[in-house]
Image (cartoon, grey):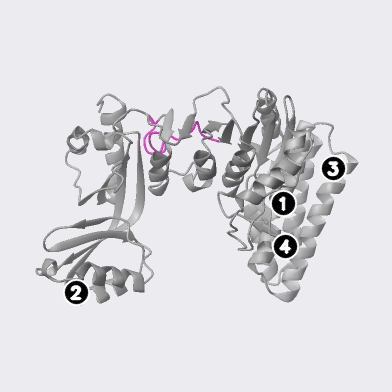
Amino acid sequence: MSPLVMKFGGTSVGDASRIEQVGTIVRTNTNGGVLVVVSAMGGVTNMLFDAARTALAGEITRSLEMRDAIRERHYAAARTLGTGLTDSLAAAITAITDELGTYLQGIGLLRELSERSMDTVASIGERLSGILVAHGLGVPCVDARLVMRTDSRFGQARPQPEAIRELAARHFAPLLGAGKILVTQGYIGSDGSGTTTTLGRGGSDYSASLFGAALDAAEIQIWTDVEGVLTCDPRVVPQAHPVEILGYEEAAELAAYGAKVLHPATIKPAVEAGIPVTVRNTMLPEGRYTTIRAGASSGLPVTALAVRKGIAIINLRQETMMDQSGFLTQLFDVFGSRGTSVDLVSTSEVCVSVTVDMAAPLDLLEKDLSALGSVEIARDRAVVALVGERLRQTPAVLATAFTALGDIGVEMISMGANEINLSLVMKSDNSGEALCRLHAAFFEGGRE
């Protein structure tokens, strides 16, 4: 049987009780063997970044106190796990945190913090959680840096799948099999010279996906603190519920418009290999969850809703723009020259409307664009996205949406090029009510 890959995030391994819960979950799924991929304990990665920046500021003593707090947190968890804080486990935790102390002192003395050094510091969290979780489960831990081969783009290293497959066969496969459990870390890797690298934020999901593809896993499970991908943000719409089946493109669109459970780019290797990815809740292991796979669909015209705030609409009016060859090229050259990414675009005979992030240099863009026509900028807008694989096949969606919105004004409409995303731009203050009304119309039988 093919192994199962189970990735547990920072909240899932945040303390001894959570790690014990992980052990309970893992031990019920060992038929084909389980590769457990762990993140750093919740909050530890941020503590490591803070410690490095504190050292860079010359506050070496303070940075070492932060190191000590990280050490004690792992000691405390170990004391109530498995056989307790054994001499060998204490020695391993001490060695890794002593190593951290050496790095922090070097950063403080040199007043230099390169991306390479930051990767080494940032890796400490995963290295500690890996040995801690393995101790709690009573199983081996293989350092992910032996398998996750990357290039040398520190801070955002690019994995090398063929090398990873070869190394996984050498270091993981012999320790996996029916009834066997193996622990490794997400997020961290090493380049061809053995120097530590990291995959960037979201890297643990990416690691699980790459390891799963390399091992031809039966399934990759992402264990977090929610029951899968929800129909909407539950903080805005309490009635939101998990989406049972989600296509890869649907997941990508939802992530782009605010859904934060996972970023689809991180699970792409698994999807391309035909391996299903499920998103599950560590605290509700028997609860609902979402399955993501290529070509899948919920069968609903709208699968989920998402919102992205902090948006501005730029309207450019030019009465003769359609008679000018290359007008749109000139327009987008302005955004390119200011390093600004354009999200949505809508055109008419005399007007082009685009959305950009509010962090863009709006005043400079207005000045540059005024050479092409009359410019108006509407700030503090939000994009409400309706996402669904069957959106393109259901013309009534637009009518249902606008009926539900009622008196909420929509200033711009855009249908994604893949026709599975209908984006509605409105005042940011109206987005919460809009989500509630749309969710009622599409997921609650039209209830007010």
| Residue at the spot of label 3 | 89
Amino acid at the residue labelled 1: Arg
In whole angstroms, how far apart are the C-alphas of marks 1 and 2?
Answer: 53 Å
Whichever of labels 1 and 4 marks the residue nearer the N terminus, that label is: 4
Query: Which region is colored magenta?
Result: 225-240
Q: Residue at x 35, y 33 (%)?
A: 303
How far across and how far down the image is residue 263, in percent? 48, 46
Helix, strand or loop at mark 2 = loop
| Residue type at numbered disc 3 | Leu
Identify the residue position indicated by label 1 in the image.
Answer: 145
Front: mark 1 or 2: 1
Q: Residue 38: horizontal and vertical position, in percent?
A: 66, 41
Query: Mark 4 highlights which residue?
Result: 63
Q: Please tell me how crowded label 1 is: few (under 14), some (14-19), or many (20+) other residues with Cα within 10 Å.
A: many
* Residue closest to the eye, 331 or 107: 331
446 magenta-colored: no
SS assignment at label 1: helix
User: How far apart in space, not on screen, are marks 3 and 2 (Cα)?
Assistant: 67 Å
Which of the marked residues, 1 or 2, is nearer the chain's N terminus? Answer: 1
